[in-house]
């Protein structure tokens, strides 16, 4: 595992924001090796986990949803979010903007949110951005996804700002002002 020393602080942080995290075989057969989601709870198999940042990334997919929907999320979070959005839209006749953003921008939001958590905890970004993560096996210097976020052009930054997780930053600083400190500082870690 890349940066195993980051696992305990990440798990403590996730539990501290109200996420259920369980260790054991339930973490097998997830979307990413060593981490699985079952009824909104994160399951971790530390023996097959590639890096603790993968746990953060999967948590990021959960946090873009209001807490009341967490128990409906499982291994294939994107499919679950799409189903929740379709059901809500059919019932209410109009798509909920929060669910729509989670369905369409959840991947970017999860990436940027994970970066902010690592910064907040004072951990090395390499626990999140390691060879093989985010489909980048070989690269020179900084991981391409990390560089995208740090250049201020990653779409997760604007989506987190639009959801009032953080203030506008990077090239998106000119697109709005919600009165919050700019990314990577966070005003909140979850939607309630």
Image (cartoon, rainbow, N blue to C red):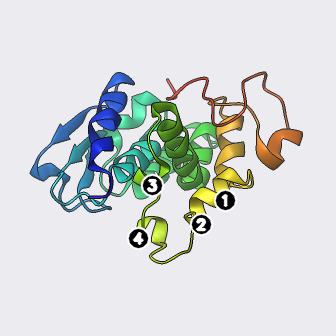
> Which of the numbered marks, if any, corresponds to residue 144?
2
Q: CA gap, disc 2 to disc 4?
A: 11 Å
Q: Label 2: state its secondary structure.
A: helix
Q: Which mark's residue is nearer the viewer, 3 or 4?
A: 3
Identify the residue under disc 4.
Answer: 132
Query: Of label 1 and label 3, which has the lower sequence position?
Result: 3
- Answer yes or no: do the residues labelled 1 and 2 have beta carbons within 8 Å? yes
Query: Of label 2 and label 3, which has the lower sequence position?
Result: 3
Query: Of label 2 and label 4, which has the lower sequence position?
Result: 4
Q: Is residue 29 left or right of residue 186?
A: left
Identify the residue under disc 1.
Answer: 148
Q: Residue furthest right?
A: 174
State the image quarter where residue 126 is shown.
bottom left
Given residues 51 and 157, the one toward you in this image is 51
Q: Which mark's residue is nearer the viewer, 2 or 3?
A: 3
Quadrant showing the N terminus: bottom left
Q: Position of residue 128 (x, y in %)?
A: 44, 53
Please determine whether, in this image, residue 89 is positioned above or below residue 126. Answer: above
Q: Label 3: state its secondary structure.
A: helix
* Other-residue count near label 1 (Cα within 10 Å), few / some / many at <14 / 14–19 / ≥20: some
Please determine whether, in this image, residue 98 is positioned above or below residue 51. Answer: above
User: Can I make out residue 175 in this image?
Assistant: no
Identify the residue under disc 3.
Answer: 126
Q: Label 1: state its secondary structure.
A: helix
Q: Residue furthest front?
A: 141
Q: CA gap, disc 3 to disc 4?
A: 11 Å
Q: CA gap, disc 1 to disc 3?
A: 14 Å
Q: CA gap, disc 2 to disc 3?
A: 12 Å
């Amino acid at each position: 595992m890349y940066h195993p020393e980051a696992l305990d602080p990440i798990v403590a942080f996730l539990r501290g924001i109200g996420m259920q995290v369980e260790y054991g075989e339930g973490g097998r057969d997830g979307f990413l090796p060593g981490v699985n989601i079952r009824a909104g709870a994160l399951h971790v198999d530390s023996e097959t986990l590639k890096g603790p940042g993968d746990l953060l990334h999967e948590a990021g997919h959960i946090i873009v949803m209001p807490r009341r929907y967490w128990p409906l999320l499982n291994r294939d979070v994107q499919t679950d979010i799409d189903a929740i959005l379709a059901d809500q839209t059919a019932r209410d006749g109009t798509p909920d903007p929060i669910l729509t953003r989670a369905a369409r921008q959840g991947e970017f939001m999860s990436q940027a949110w994970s970066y902010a958590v690592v910064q907040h905890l004072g951990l090395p970004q390499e626990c999140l951005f390691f060879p093989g993560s985010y489909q980048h096996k070989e690269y020179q210097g900084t991981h391409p996804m990390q560089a995208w976020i740090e250049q201020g052009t990653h779409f997760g930054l604007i989506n987190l700002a639009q959801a009032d997780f953080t203030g506008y930053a990077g090239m998106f600083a000119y697109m709005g002002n919600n009165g919050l400190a700019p990314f990577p500082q966070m005003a909140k870690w979850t939607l309630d």
